[in-house]
Image: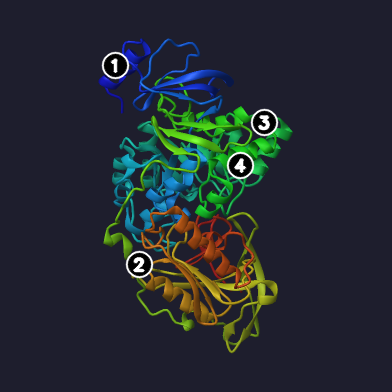
């Protein structure tokens, strides 16, 4: 929020009446507004930019010779979740800021499903101290699928409206198609409140055909990060929606979009970038939003276009371009200095006028934080988890036909298939030869003790079990395994460590990673520590024979009731498109 005093100070600086705080001299300015690159100086006062005039006759208390480095606006991640990265806001700074990201647009729906909307205040407690900006997308999916899943808490209409009214809020978080196609007045009211308050409405239109998408857009949804195939991207553009081009750990959609847009001559004006769900290890190895920029350029997009997608396109969509998204007067001084704009690797990063990164060093001190105890004790089973709870009975049968979820490489969606499985002693068996394993979703709020078992293909696990206390978006404990005994050990260990990741082989826990904050996020304040722990967990999963690049990320999406085709939640097997239960055994 601007003040009269701040504006008057900027005016006085621009008129040369008082000195600016500092000037970045000899930069090549990447102007995403005029789509030019030119030599100039950047004058800064407080948090904001005063002038980008090449021949400005202004004074500054400090001059910084940038030696011809490019000056690029700080990058914007249009949609992400801290829970998916397993990293808290304080530690996240160490991962994304060195990559040039200065704004995260955050949907807190995962952890809100555990603890309710009050958790947003907890997560934002240090917001003013962070070397990046958190822009809030108010969760709509708490729960995602009422009556089809068990969650910890609910966020209703009135609480949503209060959250929308906050200064930090930029959008109503991703709205699942069922919230509109199988609407209730409460869900529509949330959308109306957002639109009437001048906020955009995020989409999550996975699985919608064109007419369903038309209905979806007509309700007020203005963007979507879920298209996978080119036709899905194109349909959204045709309907006036903005496309968030996603590169996460479990879903990588950028190459499909960029290659087809270039090949067929479509523009990028209504496209911007997001990570959605990206592990800290992948951020460290390949980059964050700068990875989206660099990959787009490598595929043939002009550098200034790719940079615009990472900056001004997102800012305009969220109606915040008056504050950030470009290096222009009056905007926050969010600036990346780099040697190349064809492969953006920041040398320095400024956030709101202060240097927050330089040559592998973050001058901002580590932000200490102790999270409240109530948020760190959220995994409780109503009934004992024993191997017997994972048995699936089919008495009097030699074999049965079952509905299974077949995973798809590099995507979070699955395909509904059927398979014939053998029955032994009245119990349905796995089919290791065809990579069909048992999957279970275990209710973890102590409400009903549900344990629902299904069968999943293509997880590539050969022995043991892996478990995780994150399952979008209900966050019940999920486990997949080659035998019931290891599954039980894994689930119980998740509870013992109060949430996290576990790998078990031959009845022994070979690796675990504690995520005590809501059972989703690490308490560790060092990003490298979290990254190293996750690397070890991925290695442990590989010992089960699993070949997936992000096994725990994949595991977390299998029971998602808004991701087609099938979702085995704690309450049963769901046909996502119809939002109805279907039997596991096909009669």
Residue matched to label 3: 266
Residue 145 shows in this picture:
yes
State the mark number for residue 210.
4
- Mark 3 touches mark 4? (CB < 8 Å): no
> Which corner quadrant holds the C terminus?
bottom right
Where 16 falls versus 369 (above or below)? Answer: above
Please report whichever mark, 3 or 1, sits nearer to the chain's N-terminal start: 1
Alpha carbon distance from label 2 to label 1 = 53 Å
Quarter of the rendering containing residue 447: bottom left
- For label 4, the crowd category at 10 Å Cα-Cα, with few meaning under 14, some 14 to 19 and many 20 or more, is some
Residue matched to label 1: 8
Residue 391 image position (x, y, % from top left): 52, 81
From the viewer's perspective, is 60 left or right of 387?
left
Q: Determine whether the residue tagged by mark 4 lies in a helix, strand or loop.
A: helix
- Mark 3 touches mark 1? (CB < 8 Å): no
Where 13 falls versus 289 (above or below)? Answer: above
Where 461 falls versus 97 (above or below)? Answer: below
Please report whichever mark, 3 or 4, sits nearer to the chain's N-terminal start: 4
Q: Determine whether the residue tagged by mark 2 lies in a helix, strand or loop.
A: loop
Please report whichever mark, 4 or 1, sits nearer to the chain's N-terminal start: 1
State the mark number for residue 445.
2
Alpha carbon distance from label 3 to label 4 = 19 Å
- For label 2, the crowd category at 10 Å Cα-Cα, with few meaning under 14, some 14 to 19 and many 20 or more, is many
Residue placed most toward the observer, 53 or 164: 53
């Amino acid at each position: 929020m601007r003040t009269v005093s701040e504006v008057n100070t900027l005016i006085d600086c621009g008129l040369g009446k008082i000195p600016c705080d500092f000037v970045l001299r000899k930069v090549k300015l990447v102007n995403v507004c005029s789509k030019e690159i030119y030599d100039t100086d950047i004058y800064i006062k407080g948090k904001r930019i005063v002038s980008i005039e090449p021949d400005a006759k202004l004074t500054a208390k400090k001059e910084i010779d940038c030696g011809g480095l490019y000056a690029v606006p700080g990058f914007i991640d249009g949609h992400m979740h801290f829970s998916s990265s397993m990293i808290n806001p304080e530690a996240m700074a160490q991962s994304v800021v060195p990559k040039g990201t200065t704004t995260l647009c955050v949907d807190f729906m995962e952890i809100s499903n555990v603890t309710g909307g009050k958790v947003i205040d907890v997560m934002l407690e240090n917001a003013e101290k962070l070397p990046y900006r958190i822009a809030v997308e108010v969760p709509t999916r708490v729960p995602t699928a009422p009556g089809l899943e068990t969650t910890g808490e609910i966020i209703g209409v009135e609480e949503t409206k209060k959250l929308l009214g906050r200064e930090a809020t930029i959008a109503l978080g991703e709205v699942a198609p069922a919230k509109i196609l199988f609407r209730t007045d409460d869900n529509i009211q949330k959308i109306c409140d957002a639109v009437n308050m001048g906020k955009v409405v995020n989409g999550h239109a996975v699985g919608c055909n064109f007419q369903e998408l038309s209905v979806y857009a007509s309700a007020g949804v203005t963007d979507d990060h879920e298209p996978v195939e080119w036709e899905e991207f194109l349909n959204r553009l045709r309907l006036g929606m903005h496309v968030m081009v996603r590169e996460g750990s479990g879903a990588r959609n950028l190459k499909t979009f960029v290659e087809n847009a270039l090949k067929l001559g479509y523009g990028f004006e209504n496209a911007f970038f997001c990570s959605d769900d990206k592990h800290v290890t992948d951020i460290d190895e390949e980059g964050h939003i700068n990875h989206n920029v660099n990959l787009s350029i490598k595929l043939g997009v002009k550098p200034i276009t790719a940079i615009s997608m990472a900056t001004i396109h997102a800012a305009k969509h969220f109606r915040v371009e008056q504050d950030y998204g470009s290096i222009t007067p009056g905007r926050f001084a969010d600036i990346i200095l780099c040697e190349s704009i064809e492969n953006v690797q920041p040398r320095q990063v400024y956030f709101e006028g202060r240097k927050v990164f330089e040559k592998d060093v973050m001058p901002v001190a580590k932000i200490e934080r102790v999270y409240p105890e109530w948020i760190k004790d959220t995994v409780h089973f109503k009934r004992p988890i024993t191997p017997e709870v994972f048995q699936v009975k089919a008495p009097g049968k030699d074999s049965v036909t079952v509905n299974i979820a077949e995973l798809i490489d590099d995507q979070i969606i699955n395909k509904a298939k059927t398979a014939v499985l053998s029955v032994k002693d009245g119990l349905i068996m796995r089919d290791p030869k065809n990579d069909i394993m048992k999957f279970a979703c275990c209710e973890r709020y102590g409400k009903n003790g549900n344990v629902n078992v299904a069968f999943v293909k293509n997880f590539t696990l050969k022995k043991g079990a892996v478990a995780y206390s994150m399952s979008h978006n209900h966050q019940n404990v999920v486990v997949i395994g080659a035998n019931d005994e290891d599954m039980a050990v894994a689930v119980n260990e998740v509870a013992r460590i109060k949430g996290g990741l576990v790998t078990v082989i031959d009845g022994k826990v070979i690796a675990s990673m504690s995520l005590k904050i809501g059972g989703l996020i690490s308490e560790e304040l060092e990003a490298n520590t979290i990254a190293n722990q996750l690397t070890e967990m991925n290695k442990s999963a590989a010992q089960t024979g699993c070949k997936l690049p992000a096994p725990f990320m994949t595991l977390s999406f299998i029971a998602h009731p808004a991701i087609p085709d099938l979702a085995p939640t704690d309450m049963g097997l769901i046909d996502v498109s119809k939002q109805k239960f279907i039997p596991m055994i096909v009669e």
